[in-house]
Image (cartoon, grey):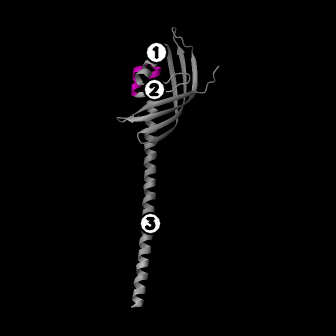
């Protein structure tokens, strides 16, 4: 009877040990597979968002080149905030549009935006990039011809399937004179 008890306990202990080991291995394998799938999915989503942001930036360049301030609402949220050095922040799409209508009436604005990196978290994305612009004044312009270049951070949010800028902060590389 003692020997039967001994073999029973030994078999039970071995079964429990191997059962636990298999459970641990299974959980580890599932976690690794999910991580790979999640990582791959996240990378694909990031590429898609980066592509959409680049498309929106191309539209931004065209709208400025063609003097289409009213079209900026296709890229900017209703509550957009823009932070430009030496100016009070712009606090709405209406304010942004009105300011830019006036600027566009003074001449031609040619922008080149280059996305360098995008970070994605759900319905929000942060873009880090570089910009260059050339301003060519018309005859009535109070602004002289200007060249500028610098860096920017733009925070994007997805609204009804469309990515729009909610915060924009360009930072010039041109020193003050």
Q: Is residue 68 visible?
A: no
Q: Residue at x 44, y 34 (%)?
A: 156
**Tags 2 and 3 in contact by the CB under 8 Å rule?**
no
Residue at image location 46% in from the left, 18% down from the top: 99
Task: Give the labeled residue for mark 2.
Answer: 60
Dominant secondary-structure state across the stretch colored magenta: helix
For mark 1, give the secondary structure.
helix
Spatial CA span between label 2 and label 3: 53 Å
Q: Which range of residues does the magenta coloring cover?
A: 59-75
Mark 2 / mark 3, whichever is N-terminal: 3
In percent of width and height, residue 166 lies at: 44, 31
Q: Can residue 107 be seen in this view?
A: yes
For mark 3, what is the residue? 24
| Mark number displayed over residue 102 | 1
Image coordinates for residue 157, horizontal then vertical, percent? 42, 35
Q: Which residue lies at the image location 45% right of the left edge and 70% below the top edge?
A: 21
């Amino acid at each position: 009877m003692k020997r039967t008890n001994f073999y029973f306990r030994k078999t039970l202990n071995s079964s429990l040990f191997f059962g636990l080991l298999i459970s641990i291995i299974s959980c580890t394998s599932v976690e690794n597979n999910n991580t790979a799938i999640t990582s791959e999915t996240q990378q694909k989503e990031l590429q898609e968002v980066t592509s959409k942001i680049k498309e929106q930036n191309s539209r931004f360049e065209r709208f400025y080149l063609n003097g289409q301030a009213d079209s900026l609402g296709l890229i900017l949220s209703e509550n957009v905030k823009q932070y430009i050095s030496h100016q009070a922040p712009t606090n709405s799409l209406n304010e942004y549009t009105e300011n830019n209508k006036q600027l566009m009436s003074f001449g031609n604005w040619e922008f080149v935006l280059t996305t360098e990196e995008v970070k994605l978290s759900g319905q929000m994305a942060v873009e880090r990039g570089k910009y260059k612009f050339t301003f060519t004044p018309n005859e009535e312009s109070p602004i002289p011809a200007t060249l500028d270049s610098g860096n920017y951070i733009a925070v994007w949010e997805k609204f009804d399937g469309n990515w729009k800028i909610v915060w924009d902060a360009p930072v010039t590389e041109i020193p003050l004179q």
